[in-house]
Structure formats: structure tokens, C-alpha cells
């Protein structure tokens, strides 16, 4: 093939190779015991209707990292099995090629760093794989309502372990809402050890917010403080320095 035509190809051989590998990772996820058990849990939670949307922050560079690629495989498996159209994803580290591959696979890359402050649609499956605590804390802050939380599930690092393993001073600074909700969440985590690699879904849990556990909480529990703000020295969490304070009523 002449050089000129090669340039016109939609994919470079490199991106083709990675695309194939994403398929392999997706297949590997779907034949695992981890997937069978996760799917059974999701079918229990979403009895009345399928998940309506996917939101993922912090997937990482899946063209470089095998862990991230298996995590993307999980997202694709969920997207396919539940036929989910509304799939939003963001990581400040995504390269242009990764953004292109995500778009080709039906994900809508979020165009700005929201720092996790996105209002959830009822029925959203949220995936925060090994993410900085700030993202979950911000997500909980902006969705701090019983009616929203009871309709969503969050697959992320196990909240109980996060609270137990983090010194109190840090919890108060960057995980206030995670700590506050922790006694009222159901965490399903045993199946996370059933994947063939132990550094992909390790330490995670599926977090469900059942109405039975939230319904008796007093109104003051749901009062929301000012927008969380964090010190700049945190290495893992990328702040949006151009981000204006959100008007949460709009
Ligand atoms: C520890 S890495 C996890 C990567 C991968 N999911 C894994 O398990 O190996 C944390 C990820 O969070 C991402 N991250 C940091 N700040 C973020 C933000 N404001 N919004 C979304 N993702 C963010 C980082 O870029 C990084 O890819």
C-alpha cells in the first residue's frame, strides 16, 4: 500500500492492535467468575429496569496500563449487556488516541475536569476504579440526596476499608461525605477477588444505597455543607484550576 494511502487509514496499526486487545480484555472479563457474580448482583439491584447510564472517572491510560484496559473491558461488558447508551467518562490523563477509541466504543468523553461533581441520573452505574478519595467525596456531595443515591450504585474502592485505613484527620479533610454515608451503605465485595488478576478490581466493592437503610435518616443528615475544597499538594487528584464554583441548583 502506498505511504499516502496508509496515512488515510482511520486507525494506525498501533491503535488497531490496542483495539483488538481491548476486545480480548472485554472477553476475559465476561468469562470470569468475577463477572458472573457482579452481574448477578447488578441484576438483583436493577430488578425493575436496566441501569440507565454509566459514569466513569479515573480509568487511567488504558493503552499503557493493562489494569485500566481490563477495567475498560468491564465497562464495555456492562454497556453491552444492559444496552446502555448514556456513557460518560473522564480522566485528565486520557490521550487523544484514547479519547478517539472511547468515542468509537460509544463513550462520550466529558470535556472538562468536573472534579467528580456531576449530578447523577437515576439508575446510573458509577465506576471509580482506584480513584482518589476526592472524586467520590465530591460525587457524594453533589448528589447528597436520598432519592438520588438509592437509585444509583457505585463500584469503587471499598468505603469501609477507605475509612478504616485513612487517618481521621485526612478523612475529615477529603472524605467527609464518604465517612458520613459509610454506615448506611451495603458493600458487596467478595466477588472482586475472583478475577484472574489481583491488581485490577482488588479492594473494590459494589456500593448500594438501599432505601431501608436511608429512609429513617433525619433531614439534617442530608444537609449539604459548602462545596468541598482540598489542598493543592494532593498528588493523585487533578484539580480544575479553571473550574468555577458550581451552581448546584442549576
Ligand atoms: C491510581 S490511578 C487509577 C488508574 C486505574 N483506574 C487503575 O486502577 O490502575 C487514579 C486515576 O484518577 C485520575 N484522576 C485524577 N484526578 C481526576 C479527576 N479530577 N477526574 C477524573 N479522574 C481523575 C488520574 O488521572 C488517574 O488515572
Image (cartoon, rainbow, N blue to C red):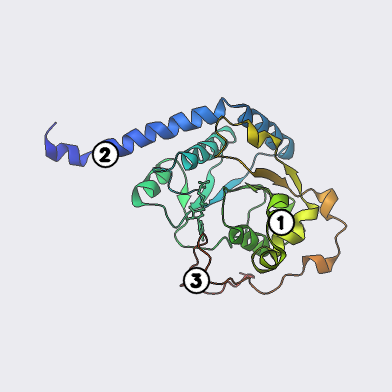
Residue for badge 3: 243
Q: Which of marks 3 and 1 is in front?
A: 1
Name the image quarter holding residue 155: top right
Residue for badge 2: 12
Separation (CA) of disc 2 from disc 1: 44 Å
Judging from the image, what secondary structure is the residue with disc 3 in? loop
The quarter of the picture where the C terminus appears is bottom right
Indicate which disc, 3 or 1, sits on the residue closer to the N terminus.
1
The quarter of the picture where the N terminus appears is top left
**Residue 87 image offset from top left, x and y in percent:** 53, 47
Indicate which disc, 3 or 2, sits on the residue closer to the N terminus.
2
Mark 1 surroundings: few (<14), some (14-19) or many (≥20) residues within 10 A: some
| Residue 104 placement, left or right of 197 | left
- The structure residue drawn at horizontal position 47% and vertical position 54%, both measured from the top left corner, is 91
**Residue 220 image offset from top left, x and y in percent:** 82, 69
Separation (CA) of disc 3 from disc 1: 28 Å
Name the image quarter holding residue 188: top right
Residue for badge 1: 163
Q: Which of marks 2 and 1 is in front?
A: 1
| Residue 151 placement, left or right of 113 | right
| Residue 200 placement, left or right of 60 | right
* Residue farthest top in this picture: 31
Amino acid at each position: 500500500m502506498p505511504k499516502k494511502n496508509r496515512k488515510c487509514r482511520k486507525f494506525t496499526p498501533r491503535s488497531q492492535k490496542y483495539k483488538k486487545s481491548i476486545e480480548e480484555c472485554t472477553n476475559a472479563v465476561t468469562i470470569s467468575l468475577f463477572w458472573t457474580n457482579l452481574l448477578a448482583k447488578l441484576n438483583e439491584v436493577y430488578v425493575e429496569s436496566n441501569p440507565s447510564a454509566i459514569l466513569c472517572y479515573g480509568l487511567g491510560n488504558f493503552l499503557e496500563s493493562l489494569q485500566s484496559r481490563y477495567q475498560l473491558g468491564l465497562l464495555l461488558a456492562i454497556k453491552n449487556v444492559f444496552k446502555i447508551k448514556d456513557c460518560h467518562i473522564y480522566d485528565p490523563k486520557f490521550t487523544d488516541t484514547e479519547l478517539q477509541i472511547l468515542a468509537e466504543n460509544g463513550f462520550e468523553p466529558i470535556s472538562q475536569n468536573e472534579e467528580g461533581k456531576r449530578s447523577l441520573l437515576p439508575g446510573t452505574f458509577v465506576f471509580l476504579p482506584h480513584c482518589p478519595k476526592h472524586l467520590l467525596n465530591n460525587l457524594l456531595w453533589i448528589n447528597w440526596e436520598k432519592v438520588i443515591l438509592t437509585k444509583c450504585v457505585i463500584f469503587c474502592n471499598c468505603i469501609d476499608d477507605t475509612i478504616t485505613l485513612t487517618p481521621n484527620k485526612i478523612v475529615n479533610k477529603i472524605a467527609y461525605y464518604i465517612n458520613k454515608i459509610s454506615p448506611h451503605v451495603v458493600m458487596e465485595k467478595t466477588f472482586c477477588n475472583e478475577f484472574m488478576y489481583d491488581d485490577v478490581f482488588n479492594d473494590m466493592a459494589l456500593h448500594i444505597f438501599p432505601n431501608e437503610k436511608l429512609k429513617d435518616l433525619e433531614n439534617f443528615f442530608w444537609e449539604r455543607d459548602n462545596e468541598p475544597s482540598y489542598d493543592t499538594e494532593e498528588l493523585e487528584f487533578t484539580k480544575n484550576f479553571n473550574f468555577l464554583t458550581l451552581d448546584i441548583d442549576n
